[in-house]
Amino acid sequence: MTEHPLDDLAAFALGVLDPEESARVERHLASCASCRAETQAFAETAWVIAETQGRDVPSRVRAAIVERARAEGPGRSSLADFFRRPVPLLVPVALAAVLVLSLAGYGTARRDADRYAAVVAQTVGAKVVPLAATGAVGGIRGSLVIPANGAAPYLILDLPPAPAGKTWEAWVIRGETPLRAGITDERGLTTLTLSASVASGDTVAVTSEPAGGVDAPTGDPVLAGKS
Amino acid sequence: MARIARGDPAALGELYDRHGRTVFGALYRMLGAPEPAEEVAQDTFHAVWRRAGTYRADRGSVRTWLLAIARNAAIDWRRTKGRRTDREAAIDEAAELVEEIRVDDRVIASLRAERVRAAVASLPAEQRIVLSLAFWSGLSQSEIAARTRTPLGTVKSRVRLGMSKLRDQLRPETEGA
């Protein structure tokens, strides 16, 4: 576990950290209950301050909010819908490694694919879950790695370039709830440390999303697997 | 929140009834005028409607999640639609952390407001000013440092110390509410 970012928790709760600092704190919070509690206390303080500034709102605002929700219907994401369908089969790790290696062995795979297979095969002291390519995008592959020593889970990815104006975004889906887990604009072989924790039974997926990432998935998964 | 996630518009209305006044007031402070505050308040609750499924109770209460969404939406609004003069005005108006407390007619709210006023008044002026900018200007700590010509480390420690004092003094207000 990294050092507790105690000096930054109040600023994080107020949303006044610079983006890279904020991302660092968010990663830490994913795995640290005591810092989460501390941050929540600051967020509640911010709420109490905000409450003193409350103002009466014109009634048209409430009507517009409820009417828009009614007209639009439930705010389900396409990703949640996707996971109401059967989840891709879990491929045993050893078999997956063999598959990856044998695919690489055909010589048609790119050099990165060879390196991808090697990196996955060399992962030790961790649970490795291959993510199934859904076919939405070609030439993509990925594995979820959950280190046994409690370090943050990460993805090993072999990525085509993201579509123009898009970024690759990872999700941890717990039940039907997708949690943001990180973005990357890399192509080729790369790793992405997940900012959300992964529990047994969670599904991990990757989608392409508008540059900078979004809070709830809008695209179909390109990779998915169940931990 | 579960009812909102299941697509019940009435539940969204109830959330609005409980917290709309605070969200609107905070947006008014950040944006400096009623029209943008109305627009962003609508966007905020629309975002809650769409994202209710992503709410995580282990990360905080619904109301703090709501406030965070509202604050981000206000910052986005200022960056994309706000005129420069609006932005400057809002920053000038951030001079006091808690100005002219507007309590509603619930007695408990006015009692609470007095405690908040006292807690804020007990902060050293430099912490109050930095916190006020952090709350209402939509500037990040490094932007506050540049604007106030103060070293970033000093801004950070004022945010941290000021918030810690407020949290400690207001703790009974924030528990279980």
Image (cartoon, rainbow, N blue to C red):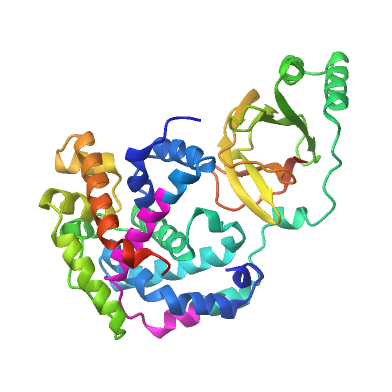
In the rendered view of the protein, which quadrant contains the C terminus of chain A? top right
Magenta stretch prevailing secondary structure: helix
Q: Residue at x 23, y 60 (%)?
A: B90
Say if B167 sits above or below A34 in the image: below
Which residue reaches farthest front? B172
Q: Residue at x 23, y 66 (%)?
A: B116
Q: Which segment is the magenta one?
A: A38-64
Residue B1 shown in magenta: no
Q: Position of residue A129 (x, y in %)?
A: 76, 33
Residue A165 in view, yes or no: no
Q: Residue at x 63, y 24 (%)?
A: A190
Q: Residue at x 37, y 44 (%)?
A: A9
Choose top left, top right, bottom left or bottom right for residue B89: bottom left
Residue situated in front as seen by the camera: A48 or A32: A32
Q: Position of residue A53 (x, y in %)?
A: 27, 70
Residue A227 in view, yes or no: yes
Say if B108 sits above or below A97 in the image: below
Which residue reaches farthest left? B125
- Whether residue A217 sits left or right of residue A88 in the image: it is left
- Whether residue A38 sits left or right of residue B33 in the image: it is right
Residue A41 shown in magenta: yes
Q: Position of residue B56 (x, y in %)?
A: 56, 56
Q: How many marks?
A: 0
Choose top left, top right, bottom left or bottom right for residue B91: bottom left
Residue situated in front as seen by the camera: A38 or B25: A38
Q: Position of residue B152 (x, y in %)?
A: 23, 35
Residue situated in front as seen by the camera: A210 or B55: B55
